[in-house]
Image (cartoon, coloured by chain):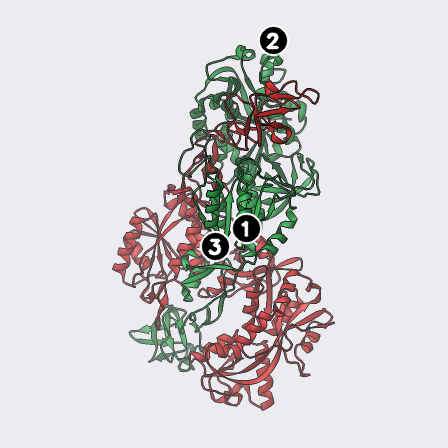
Chain colours: A green, B red
Amino acid sequence: MVKRYLEVTPLEKVPEVLAASFALRPVTVRVPLPEAVGRVTAAPLFARFSQPEVHLAAMDGIAVRAGETLGADEQHPLTLSHAVRVNTGNVLPEGYDAVIMIEEVWQEGERYTIRKPVSPWQHVRPVGEDIGVTEMVVPSRHRIRAHEVGALAAFGIRDVEVLTVRAGIVPTGSELVPFGQDPGPGQVVESNSLLAAAFLEVLGARCTRYPRVPDDPPLIRDALDRAVRENDLAIVSAGSSAGTRDYTATVIGEAGEVLFHGVAMKPGKPVILGRVQGKPVIGLPGYPLSALTVLREIAAPLLGLWGLPLPEEERLTARVTRSIASEPGTTEFVLAAVARVGDRWVAEPLSRGAGVQMAAVRANAYLRIDPAAEGVEAGSPVTARLMVPRAEAEQALLLTGSHDPSLDHLADLVRPRVDLHAASSGSLAGLLALGRGECHAAPTHLLGPDGSYNTWYLERYLPGTGVDLVCVAGREQGVVSRDGLGLADLPSHRFVNRQKGSGTRMLLDHLLAERGISPSSILGYHREMTTHLAVALAVKSGEADCGICVYSAAKALGLAFVPIGQERYELAIRREQMPDARIRALVAAIRSPVFRDRLAAMGGYDTTLTGVQRGLP
Amino acid sequence: MVKRYLEVTPLEKVPEVLAASFALRPVTVRVPLPEAVGRVTAAPLFARFSQPEVHLAAMDGIAVRAGETLGADEQHPLTLSHAVRVNTGNVLPEGYDAVIMIEEVWQEGERYTIRKPVSPWQHVRPVGEDIGVTEMVVPSRHRIRAHEVGALAAFGIRDVEVLTVRAGIVPTGSELVPFGQDPGPGQVVESNSLLAAAFLEVLGARCTRYPRVPDDPPLIRDALDRAVRENDLAIVSAGSSAGTRDYTATVIGEAGEVLFHGVAMKPGKPVILGRVQGKPVIGLPGYPLSALTVLREIAAPLLGLWGLPLPEEERLTARVTRSIASEPGTTEFVLAAVARVGDRWVAEPLSRGAGVQMAAVRANAYLRIDPAAEGVEAGSPVTARLMVPRAEAEQALLLTGSHDPSLDHLADLVRPRVDLHAASSGSLAGLLALGRGECHAAPTHLLGPDGSYNTWYLERYLPGTGVDLVCVAGREQGVVSRDGLGLADLPSHRFVNRQKGSGTRMLLDHLLAERGISPSSILGYHREMTTHLAVALAVKSGEADCGICVYSAAKALGLAFVPIGQERYELAIRREQMPDARIRALVAAIRSPVFRDRLAAMGGYDTTLTGVQRGLP
């Protein structure tokens, strides 16, 4: 019924297809001046009157005729009979041409005495000092800044014709419930039309979100026709892929024509570009990060063709912390957390799942991998495109290592001066990243063969590096289940594990060895989760019967928890970086009473050692 | 009645006064999610449900039980009896734990045959892959980005508690007419409350503009009381100076107390900070640039104390093109146009008149001169704080030299890739700036002793520099008057001149010498204007009877014009900079048909040579 992508369009070709396929003329809307901040002028704005319109006093003092002040000096003070008291901003009376500051005048009633002459036009704001009637205030395509509103109002401008594009967004999908309702089983909140509207409105578009349409071609067709009729650009959200219920391409093809279906980029490959009644129609993929990529890489350049100026993102060169595979011939976009560690920038790639919206929430940058490349090797330089102002990227603090729910609370407590990004790679990978200078701190809880926490591994893996350990808390690990299972129950139940190199997994292996339980006897030993809550969720959903995680994760989901041991959860930080303002803020947050309160509320933490710092050579 | 500033507060002291004088607690407001873009979270946002809430198919294909696929291979294809056809995003049926891509399945009716086994959870989006219920989505004090709206909606967030401050703004002044009305003689449009509201709302405040109040203390007092009652912060606009009708300080003092009146900064010195009912009250000076400075230097830090994060402006080091005098003990702020010329940044200071709002419209940066300094010498490095994104500052093209109204049209035509800033310094000063590498192009029209335009001066002042001249137009200069005066009438009438070094003035001097008219015989010969329109305005307003300017300025104001000669108005550009994209765009704009049309509409231009380029060694 729906064709596979027989031919995908290279992303580099998209701009020429856009430019060649549509004759787009600027769309404008007139908005009242106070609402024009951030909007872009469609035409130059000219002053409707001069500012000032008449000569004004520029000082508090007396208005005089300069010619009548000639001859005044210390020996020959002059008393003026025609002087007029004026305040700053007063209209200069007819025939007067100068102002003498009140401080330089001896006043008795209405009589003013001066001791030096003045030149004509002294302390006078002449007509048009600020602007003359008919002069251009701002050119076209100018983004109006907040502080310009006062000037524009003063020059007689009341409303402004600004550039826009009317975009109509049609969400499709039988599984959708409208924003504002909670989804039932198997349903999801329709959110991509909100994403598209928010994204495009920042660029200057005026968006209409139409009611969601079920997966029914005639209904989709009706909604598309309406969106095309009422707008300059129509966007059909979802149904652009090649499943049995993906009707978007067919509907666009019947209403007009499909210009391309499938672009060699990832995420966002299933995008459709169509033309209906001469107007562009975009078929937006349903995965949120695919949708976001299409909005940025295809919809935004299209708005540019209507004349809307697109803000340029800042770029910087960063060292990528992990290798990224990519498919040759495809432009790949990878969300990342960038941070300045010491004197260089590092980029930590985030999850590449097109459905993982949290990656875009956590990202402050993205990478673009050229279709000619086969990927990027760990440690090599990449160009990161910032999704935040550079000053905000400078505040990024990168933690790589073991995950704990309390890190979210630290991220909250260090705001707004510090922007904490936590990458869950497991304790050991975190220490190695710290060794390579690829993070600011490594959260770690590694039980050494000598029974010590963290120190044995640090001495082995980062000898002589000069690392300090700052304790976040002692924390309880245990078996999470729906019905109170313990360690001995693992072989007889379905289990979910944590990833290799994580302290939790190493603790489990240690305990299993102590008890003589073979990992191969445990069903699901190889099923790996990267966070405590993911383990608890797998148990909660019935995917598994038990797992291992911290108490707070079990508690958050109302699950049973059988403790198996307390461990020391610490941050490893290079000593040379302790003076960094971001690290100081992090340590201060750990030591704050409010953080202890939060740990207590989460449960399962022992705060005796919280904030304690110890050093290793 | 009103005291002079007996004691001004140093600007560096202001933050501690603010912090010590008020106990400010975060103010919040709940806004629907779609309106939350750009707003700042008052508290962390937590996921209300997991995403996905159930296991979903991550591919189009068939849902299977992985255990039942064991043993399938090329030799032993396996036909599955329980497989279920699923599309991407479909709920995985109960008991199923993997998806096989449709491309890898041989289908006959409802029977599906596979040739290899799958592992559990292949192509499945497990519960909570994106986020788990109870997890933190964003921390507090987080500015919500457009692309996060989709994620937040998907995670069940419908409205957001964001930080704000309620600010009430009371404009005072008997001379004011409300925004939306045209001012009568001696009146001005009330624009400072719009300025304040626009400025503070970008930072997250919710502003109420109250009706304007005449200069009458009891009425100001009533309005102040209401603004304090209904808001967290009250701003009284104007009346903060020391004129006979400046009541603001007195009224604030009677309603509560004045904490300081007068800060050692310029512009903005007459600012008042008061406390009424424990709430801060700012007396905003009436001059627009004073008001803007107070908003940026005092009101914004105050909003910061309520918790609103203040965007950090980017900074860069630039060479200042002119010396700037400053008063020791006073922090001076100077608006500037910065541009990258070759490989370094230059900063062209703009008018320092506190009433010249166009300086803030034209500025893309400002300088802050330390109170310990006595000014800045021309050519020395200064820190410029950008008022635009850095990428936009990179687009700045700086023209220094002779003024012509057509430059505004060029500024319009080079948008949006180029941001043209024209500084009116006169032709000769422009050429010298070009020689020092302090501008991209110098508009010039200098009649040499040999009768040639521009070349004689270039050979004399920039020998061997390698300069190209690009002709903007031939243009007609003449005597502007209300009643048709000519050159011979100058000695018997009041005249306004252009500044020394301007081509117009040199042309005048040449013609006066030819006719044997002595400059000293001309009343107003020393009265200098920097633009053609300013000359025409002085004549229009009756300040002078005649002046000298281009035809288009006389025409714009409907004045009489008696031609005195045509001259060659050209841009001098260093040849090495001709390949610069900004310069190429400028030259293309000069050569465009639409520019010729605009010149024709303005009148007084001969476009025969428009766009013609000639080189000098």
Mark 2 secondary-structure assignment = loop
Q: In the picture, residue A380 is in which quadrant?
A: top right
Instruction: Report in which chain the residue with disc 3 lies.
Output: A
Q: Distance of mark 1 from mark 3, alpha carbons?
A: 35 Å
Can residue B329 be seen in the rendering of this structure? no
Q: Position of residue A132 (x, y in %)?
A: 46, 72
Q: Position of residue A543 (x, y in %)?
A: 52, 21
- Front-most of A480 and B75? B75
Q: Position of residue A274 (x, y in %)?
A: 56, 49
Label 2, on which residue? A516
N-terminal-most mark, 2 or 3: 3
Q: Residue placed at 56% from the left, 11% from the top?
A: A491
Q: In the picture, residue A399 is in which quadrant?
A: top right
Instruction: Report in which chain the residue with disc 2 lies.
Output: A
Label 3, on which residue? A38
Q: Distance of mark 2 from mark 1, alpha carbons?
A: 69 Å
Q: Is residue A578 above or below residue B207?
A: above
Amino acid type assigned to the residue bearing label 3 in the image = Gly
N-terminal-most mark, 2 or 1: 1
Q: Distance of mark 2 from mark 3, alpha carbons?
A: 67 Å
Mark 3 secondary-structure assignment = loop
Amino acid type assigned to the residue bearing label 2 in the image = Gly
Label 1, on which residue? A256
